[in-house]
Image: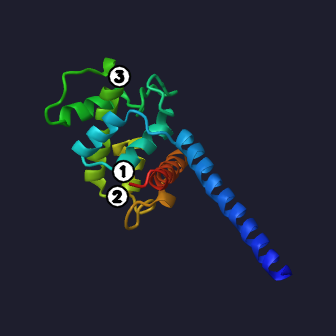
Amino acid sequence: MKHSRLVKHLFGVLAVVLAAIVILGFVLHAVYTVAYPKKYTEYVEKYAEEYHVDQNLVYAVIRCESGFNPNAVSNVGAKGLMQLMEDTFDWAQSRMPDAPDVTYDQVFDPEVNIQHGVYVLHLLLEEFQSEPTAIAAYHAGWGSVKEWLESPEHSPTELNIESIPFDDTKTYVKRVLKTKFIYEKIYKE
């Protein structure tokens, strides 16, 4: 008799613990989706697909660059969701097939900014064939990364995160990759 009560009690405790774990999982997922939102999905999905760039990478860059603030301006003058400088915007615009008739003055428009930012990522991924290297180039510039790749000091065989000579770029690459990983885990599709 005592044994069966003990077993029932243990099953009851186990059921409560399992329910608490499930509830905690839902709460954590909700917290993460607030901290790592998917905003501007119509533009991110459209241009990520058009230019063959991983959506999670785009969301990670936007989150790290502007925190999804379309009016963000950096201390060096980069603007919008994906923090584009005017020369970078113009570089993308000049290479875009069927480039839209827009100017840098429209960079605060989410669609214009995302289209150009995703295209820049596309160009860098094609050029460098490495996501970390492309992210480093997005942050430090194409020219800086080309120099690093040509330097045996920074790139004996290929650029890796530890060999990036700019600490802020090294930190940025790690942050974007970690953020992309979190997006992949939260929004499993």
Q: Is residue 187 above or below residue 44?
A: below
**Closest to the observer: 85 or 52?**
52
Q: Nearer the viewer, mark 2 or mark 3?
A: 3
Indicate the amino acid at tag 1: Ala
Q: Give the spatial CA distance, label 2 vs label 3.
A: 29 Å
Residue 119: which quarter of the image?
top left
Question: Residue 92: percent from the left, percent from the top?
Answer: 25, 35
Residue at position x 71%, y 63% in the image: 17
Question: Residue 57: percent from the left, percent from the top?
Answer: 39, 48
The reply to whether discs 2 and 1 touch (Cβ–Cβ < 8 Å) is: yes
Indicate the amino acid at tag 2: Ser
Q: Is residue 117 visible?
A: no
Residue receiving disc 1: 134
**Secondary-structure class at tag 1:** helix
Numbered badge on residue 119: none
Residue 110: which quarter of the image?
top left
How many marks can you see? 3
Residue receiving disc 3: 109
Residue 39: which quarter of the image?
top left
The single residue placed furthest to the right in the displayed view is 2
Q: Quadrant of the N terminus?
A: bottom right
**Secondary-structure class at tag 2:** loop
Residue receiving disc 2: 130
